Image: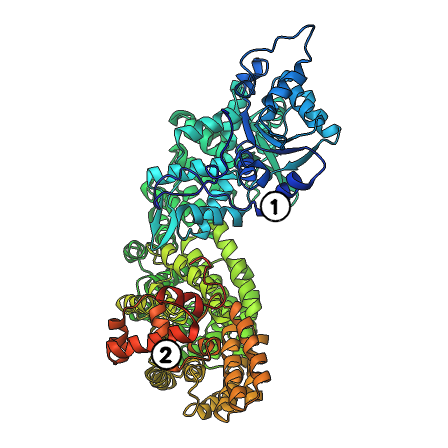
Amino acid sequence: MNGRIDRQASSEHVGQEAGSSPRSWPLTGRDDVLRELISRLEHSDRPCLLITGAAGVGKTRLARELLSRTEASQGQAMVASASESTAQIPFGALAHLLPATWPSADGRPNLLRVLADALLADADGGQRILLVDDAHLLDEGSAALLLHLAVRDGTRLVLTARSGVTMPDAIEALVRGDYAARVDLRPLEPDSVGHLLERTLRGHVGTTTVRRLWECSSGNVLWLQQLVDAGLSFGALTVIEEVWSWQGPFQLSTQLVDLVSRRIGELPADVQRAAGLLAFGEPLGVPVLEELTSAAVMDELDRRNLVVSERDGRRIHLRLAHPLYGEVLRGQTPAHRRRQYCKELAAAVRRTGLRRREDIARVGGWLLEAGDLSDPRLLVSAADHAVLTMDFTLAAKLAQAACDAGGGAPARRTLAITLGYAGHGARAEQVHSDLPQSVTFSRDHLQSVQLRAANLYLSLDRPADALELLRRTEQAMTDDTARAELAALQAILLAVHADWSAYARAVTRARDYTPPSPRTALRLRYAECVDHFCHGRTVAARQLIESALSASDGDDDIPMVRAGLLGWLCIIQAFSGLLGEAEATAVDQYRQAQDSGWIGHLGAWQFYLGRVAARQGRLRSAQRHMREAVSTLRDDSTWGQQALILGEWATVEALIGDADKAKALLDQAHLARVESYRVFHIPAFQMAQPWILATQGRGGDAARQAIRAAGDARKREAPLWEAELLHLPIRLGRPATVSGRLAELAAASDAPHIGIYAEHAAALASRDASGVERACTAFEAAGMYLHAAEAAAHAALLWSRHSDVARAQQVADRCHQLAQRCEGVTTPAVLACWTPELTDRERDIARLAAIGQSSQRIAGQLGITVRTVDNHLHRVYRKTGVSGRSELRKVLSIGSPDSPQ
């Protein structure tokens, strides 16, 4: 019968290549509601399900999925769709399901009964399901027929309807009479939008892109689909360094513009003007909009559900009810009217007194949009305020406009600052170098010199030039306060450069000039906390960083100082037994970076999130964060961290077991090697290689490589990194030559994890299974779950050697539970615990075969013959009960191998 749906055909799936426009999106984020609907449809006494929600939220998709998964619908389902056109025709929506001619009968037939009999004619005694889409658009006759079917046995109804609209009386009666169970479908949450995008695009979608698309679509699936289609068509949604990212402003398809325009509706001229002002000015304070329009117009905006209000302290601000309203209204506004709106907004906010901190930057932005460059001083001030709110894109535009308008040296100085923050380091240095130099103290000049030095060090990787600029300016200045501040900034750069003798001299000079000013004291605390941390004094480092952050609340001169302090806080927390606090810091700062739109800050905190996740042993999460950081910072040089990210990402990939990916990343890190940030060179450039060797089955070489790198760390006075490298052979089960030095480092440092490393090493060296278990417990308490899993694996092996089978199995189970938290880890110790029946050589060969390497390549890596490899594989298959390489990965997987990559 026309209108029936086939169970198999209705099971929709994505079948397009990544990058093409998705034809059918997978159902995502609706598992709970779908289970509820299936249960109600199959077991509830009520014959009707009414699914309501906003237009485009996914009601139809959910209803069809419900029918496809319900056993009762196999061959017994009917489908109808109502529309505004069929609403004008009696039984129009159901016409294809009803008989072509009326049956002849004496007297007046019972119309509803006759039609119901016709609908159920082919039921063969079974139950029928009727799906009616957009039931709120049904004519009264069709609605009455549905009510009749609900009262009569033998039919299940699944109806969808738009929420917030008037329903036909018979549909309302279904709910009033308790014949229908109503389920309101909400928009998708951000996590569900992210999963849906990744399933549809078949790849990693950046967190910021997910957030932008969720905010702009408000979780409405139809609008989300339209945005993605437009992004793919226009090239705005594209893959950057393995991550799907949205670049630039939103571009809307004609279809989406039409959808949104219909939702907005036809507006009277005065209401259209008010909506346009909101589109260019949101959020707007109520007094500002009251000054620009009338109370009646504001009431009309509210009546049409075009505005929403939000409270900010004592103030109430107005926004358009949906982000897409603003996108469409801005796109439909002619250039001359756009300029007029911006002039009016700037004038109105200036008349209200520029009460909020960001008001002057917003006024400057409106004047810029209006083409009004008549006041370069105001533009410079607006740019300075935009810097304070971390809107560096707007700040750079305002500063450039001020320069073009004849703002002189102040405008050029601000432009140089904003370019540096915006990630354009080379252009920033060019503008800085053209500024007039002075030996007379002024706050502007002192700030400019410090930011130029920071740009040289951080963005351009010219540490010698940065330090020389500060040294030269310090010598030329006659004001001791300024000289002390410059010496203190040198101390920071020298500390992160790991030049400890020069660092000590800079600290001494800064203290000798004069009693430290607040800014000098802040910079000295910054430098000293780096010193304490790098030398293993984590308690003192944490105290200093917390003190410095408290003191920096009022230091708005150089936002980069506070940003750097927060980064060091996260690092210090991660290495001082406070991994939970480190994660909270990183999450909070990442959210703030998303709000500010500062790309350099965003990429840096993605990196820190990856560092913390790697420290916790959550390797797949660390992999995602590192990948996003590289993608975000590809064209941004604010922090100059690409090489550092690539190197630490390489270690993560090696721990996951992908030696080829790890080696490629490490090669890229060496090619992008920086001279700055020497305190992080060891984890960036020397930590990955031992793990790559271990992943390739060369455990002895890995241990020797780690010990050599630890010797280099010792020469560089880097006890934290020395301890990490010395613990690596322990993790590989080779403790003999390093346990003594780890004990020395533990005695000289207050870093809690180094003490656990020493305990782990000593217990493993003496074959003390209980001692290794205690190390496992300490690692778990510290949140270092991969280290804990490896220690549990070592303990299980020792108990087995002590012939305590029950205790060995108990600790092996603990290893497996801990590995579950590490998202699919297969490091050698954990894998040995997972496959005790295999020899070390068999395990190495099995792991390499499981990731797709040929026998010839495995033989080359391990220095054996191809025949030997194949013989070992044959024994692996026999012991594990698999038939070939394709099944090995499942056997060797622990945790969540199917986690997003």
286 relative to 11 in the view: left or right: right
- Mark 2 residue crowding within 10 angstroms, few (<14) / some (14–19) / many (20+): some
Q: Which mark is residue 842?
A: 2
Instruction: Locate residue 437, reporting x and y percent.
Output: 31, 59
- The residue lying toward the viewer, choosing from 818 and 403, is 818
Foreground pick, 50 / 539? 50
In this image, 829 relative to 242: left or right?
right
Q: How is the image coloured?
A: rainbow
Category of crowding for the residue at label 1, using alpha-carbon neighbours closer than 10 angstroms: few (below 14), some (14–19), many (at least 20): few
Numbered label attached to residue 35: 1
Helix, strand, or loop for circle 2? helix
Q: Earlier in the sequence, mark 2 or mark 1?
A: 1
In the depicted structure, whether residue 436 falls above or below residue 220: below
Up-down relation of residue 441 to residue 789 (above or below): above
Q: Is residue 291 above or below residue 709?
A: above
Residue 489 shows in this picture: yes
Task: Give how far across and how far down residue 829 sits, in percent.
Answer: 45, 79
Q: Secondary structure at mark 1?
A: helix
Q: Amino acid at mark 2?
A: Glu
Image-based side of 666 in relation to 261, left or right: left
The numbered mark at residue 747 is none
- Residue 389 in view (yes/no): no
The C terminus: image quadrant: bottom left
Between the C-alphas of marks 2 and 1, the distance is 45 Å
Residue extending farthest to the front is: 124
Compared to 525, does 736 lie above or below? below
From the viewer's perspective, tell me whether residue 447 is left or right of residue 113. Answer: left
Q: Residue furthest top?
A: 107
Q: Residue at x 59, y 13 (%)?
A: 90
Type of amino acid at the residue the image marks with label 1: Arg
Comparing 471 with 459, the one in front is 459
Residue that lies at the very extreme toward the right in this rendered image = 177
